[in-house]
Amino acid sequence: MKIRKAIFPVGGLGTRFLPATKAMPKEMLPVVDKPLIQYAVEEAAAAGIEDFIFVTGRNKSAIEDHFDHSTELESVLHSKGKTDAVKTVQEMMKTPGSVSYVRQQEPAGLGHAVWCARNLIGDEPVAVLLADDLILGSPALKEMCDEWTGGNMVATMHVDPAQTSSYGIVTPGKEIGNLIEVKGLVEKPDPKDAPSTIAVVGRYIIQPSVFATLSTHSSGAGGEIQLTDALSREIGKTPFFGYQFSGTRFDCGSKLGFLQANIAFALERDELKQPLQDWLNKIS
Ligand code: G1P
């Protein structure tokens, strides 16, 4: 079965990036010249996703505008003969009707955000992508979809033992290639309680049954409704694997990760690579 739909939870307040995010969604912060959310949408499209569902909140209209035509901009670019720029803004447009928005009226957690999209999903598995987790290299969701044969799946990576309290952490079972059986899952455990250092990164393939579990609205870590908790309740009912993706992940929810991502992605650009590298050598 093919994964056709993806949910992008974009309702967060972005308090760690204030004042930049006072009036602008954190998902619109650019890495080099592209907003975080566009990287996530492009990764989903590379995995064959056809329906793009954004769970938004207040102050998020810039995201809707970003994925819409800007007729005035396009006609100015046309009249100035800036065909490359016209291509850049037109290529990112999705087929009419394939982008939907649903509003999360309160910031009640990632699980709640995903649950808000339930009426747009129906009875099929769906991908979830967190734009804060930016992945350089091979698109992680495509790698996951290629390996997925049913059940639930999360992207995973090893983290420093001191960092377990920032992630969903897996109790690992058997390993088959890049797949790790998930025997347990806990949200943001203290390092002393963490079952491993295998962390969940923001790429998920979830079964529709997860929505039923989420509808119980049980709150977990931080008093929020956690996707991690709903997924952990599915263990034993359906296959559940972690997938160790091959790319490099940047935590763009933190200032350091965001700055690192900007440098790493800029070093991938032909026109920026050498001058940036020269400058980095000079200042280090
Ligand atoms: C969320 C999830 C967490 C996951 C993390 C990955 O946490 O709840 O399980 O490990 O994303 O980035 P957040 O970073 O939104 O607090």
Image (cartoon, rainbow, N blue to C red):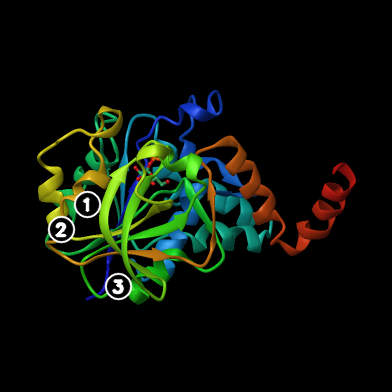
Give residue 87's quadrant in the image. Answer: bottom right
Give residue 189's quadrant in the image. Answer: top left
Label 2 or label 3, whichever lies nearer to me, is 3
Q: CA distance from mark 2 to mark 1?
A: 11 Å
Residue sitting at x 49%, y 24%: 22
Which of disc 1 and disc 2 is earlier in sequence? Answer: 2
Is residue 149 shown left or right of residue 247? left
Q: Kindly identify the amino acid type of the residue bearing the numbered disc 2.
A: Pro
Q: CA distance from mark 1 to mark 3?
A: 16 Å
Q: Position of residue 186 (x, y in %)?
A: 29, 45
Closer to us: 248 or 92: 248
User: What secondary structure is found at the residue carrying circle 2?
Assistant: loop
Classify mark 1 as within 8 Å of ligand 1 or not, answering yes or no: no
Q: Residues within 10 Å of mark 2 (few under 14, many from 20)?
A: some
Which of disc 3 and disc 2 is earlier in sequence? Answer: 3
The residue wearing badge 3 is 148
The residue wearing badge 2 is 208
> Does residue 277 sit above or below 241 in this rendering?
above
Q: Quadrant of ligand 1?
A: top left
Q: Position of residue 220 (x, y in %)?
A: 23, 34
Q: Kindly identify the amino acid type of the residue bearing the numbered disc 3.
A: Trp
